[in-house]
Amino acid sequence: MKKSYIILTLLFIFTLTIFVTLFPSKTKAQVTAAACPSGLVSYWRGDGDTTDSIGLNNGQFVDNAQFTTGKVNQAFNFDGGYFKSGSLNLPTGNAPRTLEFWVKSPNMAVGDTFLAGWGNNANYQMSSIFLGWANQRSSRYASWEFGTSVIGSVLANDTWYHLAMTYDGTTNWDAVKIYLNGARDTESWYPYVTQNLITPPGTDFIMAFNSFFEEYYKSHPDGQLDHRFHGAMDEVAVFNYVLTEAEINQHYQNGVAVLPYCEPTVNVAIDIKPGSTSNCFNNNGYGALPVAILGSSNFDANQVNPETVALNGMVVKAVGKSNKLLAHIEDTNSDGFMDMVVQIQDADGAYASGETLATLAGKTFSGKDIKGTDTICIVP
């Protein structure tokens, strides 16, 4: 009896092993945020501030606006107020572009309510997305170019949606496309024959407010409380090129995984030859050059991975049988924040005579890109 039990047990284990081998369990693909592309010109994360994490368009709140729980970390929360910034480097004229963001509201059934965009209130001079085309409280979203629109699907209340619009720079009827939750909106329709954007420079980027709607409905009341957006917006971004559907879908999937579209490069301060007033050195391939990556109130230098650090291609020097990297932590400038000091292995010809700027690049242990620059002088 005991022998039979052992044989049956072994047969069961053998059968189970074969089954697992032939039919392995499916694993979900890991979603990660890549480094931000150069074509991303502005990126407002809404994580407790109104700064542009990529570009030059730091914003400000006007009237009643604050922050709330977002799709990714925190989000902008509007209840009668709005967001305003400049539009430096944002696409103008008929240049290609992409606008995308996450949005949620307790009431999507509003007419002519601006969500986000930039440009003027004149024909073909706007690049934006809004709710309630032609003041129809249908819960539909649409692109708005002031004079043309592409009308999208109905949006439910209290639900996060990822919206995107692209413009390819042509006058074709489908030059503007809209996307819902990572896919081109198959419910969209084009009430106009052509798209011909001529967005002027020097306008503001706005969220949750439009001056044309504001003034028009003051003199043409329609019973709606106001035409400002009441709700949350998150991960608002503008690109100077047309994102593909695959790229937009990746950004949607990132949000589902509570990740940003991409990880911006962290700009760090560096000090070549810390403690010295001169950054001159002989680039002859001998010796090592000390460089301090400076810590601050918003950057922990302990998180830098020295294996990834390079100064114009020159890497951190390694010594001994174990190839130990010459890197340590100290407060080089006595500011109360610890710095990482690395010894960069000199490489002959890394710099030409007369060069005056060196760039350090690397990554943190969590994979974020870092970059810093300092002045140099090359001596014979």
Image (spheres, rainbow, N blue to C red):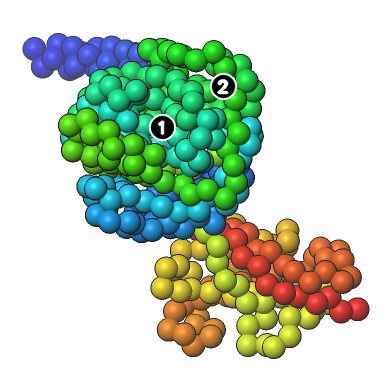
Q: Rate crowding at label 2 as few (under 14), some (14 to 19) or many (20 or more) other CA atoms within 10 Å.
A: many
Q: Is residue 114 above or below residue 26?
A: below
Q: Rate crowding at label 1 as few (under 14), some (14 to 19) or many (20 or more) other CA atoms within 10 Å.
A: many
Quarter placement of the N terminus: top left
Work out how far the residue at label 2 is from the one at label 1, CA to CA, in angstroms.
15 Å
Ranked by sequence position, the earlier of labels 2 and 1 is 1
**Quarter location, residue 194:** top right
Instruction: Residue at 60% x, 34% y: name it.
Output: 198
| Tag 2: amino acid | Gln
Q: Nearer the viewer, residue 137 or 238?
A: 137
Q: Is residue 165 visible?
A: no
User: SS for tag 1?
Assistant: strand
Instruction: Residue at 50% x, 40% y: name it.
Output: 120
Q: Is residue 174 visible?
A: yes
Instruction: Residue at 60% x, 61% y: name it.
Output: 371
> What residue is disc 2 on?
195
Q: Nearer the viewer, residue 128 or 164?
A: 128
Q: Is residue 48 above or below residue 357?
A: above
Instruction: Residue at 45% x, 54% y: name it.
Output: 85
| Tag 1: amino acid | Ile
Residue occupying the far front of the picture: 219
Residue 80 position in % (x across, y down): 24, 48
